[in-house]
Image (tube, helix red, strand yellow):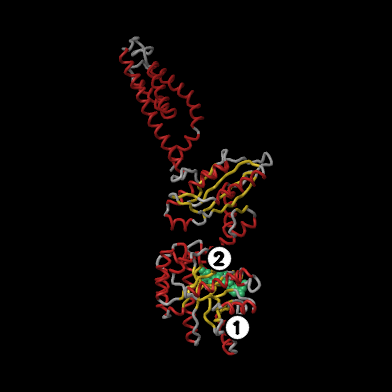
Amino acid sequence: MNTMRLFEWLAVHIRAIRIAMVPILIAMVCGVYSLVYITGGIKFVYSHSMYLPIMLAGFVFGMRGGLVVGLIGGIVLGPFMPIDVSTGEQQAMLNWLYRTGFFMLVGFSCGGASDSVRSYLRHLKWIARHDLATQLPNRSALLDALAELPKVKSNANLHVLVVVSLQNAMELKSAFGFDVIEEVIRQSAARYTNILQDKVQVYRIDPEQLGILIKNRDAQTINLLLADLVRGARQPYQFNAIPIHADSRLGYATFGKVIQSPEFYLQRAESALISADEDALDCVAYSPETSNFAKENLSILGNLMSAIKEGQLSLHYQPKICIRTGEVHSVEALMRWNHPERGNIPPAIFIPRAEQSTLINLITEFALEQAMKQIVLWRQQGIHLPIAVNISPRNLLQPGFSDLVLSLLQRYDVSGQSLELEVTEGALMTDIARTIVELSRLAEAKITISIDDFGTGYSSLQYLHQLPISLIKIDQSFVRRLPDDKGAVHIVEAAVTLAHKMGMQTIAEGVEEQSAYRLLSDLGCDIAQGYMISRPLPAAEFEKWHAQYQAENLSLPA
Ligand code: C2E
Ligand code: CA
Ligand code: CA
């Protein structure tokens, strides 16, 4: 490592070293010449010390330097230098030529070795600063470029650091294989370079991220360039002659001068990217709020593991009512995090963050296990209600997910009929072949599979038919617009008809108003869930609600 550092230092300062070496080499050659002369001439051993300046010249100046100093060495110890100073005996021409040739050979060899080491080091340095697959400069090259920006602001212009990220990389990889990412990164780098033209470098800072440094532009130009970049990002890419859509998001930070470490600016652009991702926006600028938000979210994620262990997570239960009979059909388990300092953290904050990491597997496992324990407890109390657990897209891609669910059923001695899994449309479409296999195994064990948030994703009806789904949950965004919004009415009506034609039932979620409930009943919707019936409640409170509901034999107006 230290030798590498020394070589690196030498490579950086080579010009100064070469300049300094010129007088040193002249002095050395003259010194050796004088030494040989003073000690009596060529026949004395000191003539060998001429190798020293030759080798040094080869090392510092390379092959050509070694040859030149070898030749000079040969000349100075040549015909003007006698074999014996005291007798004045001169050396033979052949001897002199031979020595000169040998000196040049030494210079040539040392220089050649030094040149190879230098070119190898240059290559290593290139590798350290580039992405080999795309040949684009990498993250450390970007940090170096940031470090080289001026420390003082000379005009009103700004620098912009943009980070572009491929959001649907996992989906693309599972559909087209790993090569697709390299290809999309290559094409997008070429596209952005083309858009930005003069001297804007694009860097690959992560396997699925590009960094773009736009230097010294006025605010108006920056806005136009960013708009062009966003437009460029939306264009499809070609992979094996197939047009594919890569879902790109942009986060950027603007600054006038570089007074902090280069990482500081990159972190700002990346925290803007996190906000773009969370709010599903194409392009977001850094602001202190986005940074706090990102920091908060990251610290949340850091605490999540211990939250599970320390029992800060729990499930709340929200009933689903069978519209025709008014009976409680089942309950949905919704995760709650009771943080000791921050109070209740809603699932909308921590679930999407957990979904981006493998932590979601722990969460789902926890939810499944809690639900099983609750089913057993309620069974002992005479409450026989299936519990629906929410499943994230990542869970279905996790190898052995169905095994996990089936083994939990076995461990708690719970029948599949007591468990429902709510899966979003996106989850179903990510890897359809695998999803079919996993869900079929679960459905064979009589577990109910329902599609959550139906109408918000882009499920293919053809695939819906192939999946073992028994329930469709119509998304709250439609239900909340009932009964006045005609468009929403038509969508709900169509979903109910479609579900029934395919032998499935429908649940309307987010039912808040009696009027909506009545219309849902008229439209033939099977099940309703929402604040109008009950909010999600902790187990003990749900038991009270359930007892009261049963006692009053409250049948909701149909
Ligand atoms: P979701 O699965 O669509 O759950 C329905 C959400 O709507 C719940 O929000 C519920 O409290 C809320 N809700 C129910 N009825 C009404 C209503 O009448 N009006 C309104 N405005 N809202 C209603 P919550 O509990 O905040 O959960 C949000 C999302 O977090 C869930 O959406 C689900 O996607 C996710 N989530 C919750 N628990 C889990 C879990 O254990 N695992 C996973 N993977 N996701 C979970
Ligand atoms: Ca749900
Ligand atoms: Ca939902």
- Res. 558 mark: 1
Near-viewer residue (507 or 434): 507
- SS under mark 2: loop
- Res. 456 mark: 2
User: Are there few (<14), some (14-19), or many (20+) residues within 10 Å of tag 1?
Assistant: some
Quarter occupied by residue 398: bottom left
Is residue 307 in view? no
Q: Is residue 46 above or below residue 458?
A: above
Q: Is residue 535 above or below residue 272?
A: below
Near-viewer residue (225 or 484): 484
- SS under mark 1: loop
Badge 2 or badge 1: first in the primary sequence: 2
Q: Residue 518: x, y in percent?
A: 62, 79
Residue at x 53%, y 72% (from the top left corner): 473
Q: Amino acid at mark 2?
A: Thr
Q: Residue 402: x, y in percent?
A: 41, 70
Near-viewer residue (308 or 280): 280
- Res. 468 mark: none
Quarter occupied by residue 454: bottom right
Q: Is residue 303 above or below residue 267?
A: below
Near-viewer residue (41 or 144): 144
Q: Residue furthest right?
A: 156
Q: Is residue 454 above or below residue 264?
A: below
Is residue 441 in view? yes
Between circles 2 and 1, the one closer to the viewer is 1
Q: Residue 151: x, y in percent?
A: 63, 41
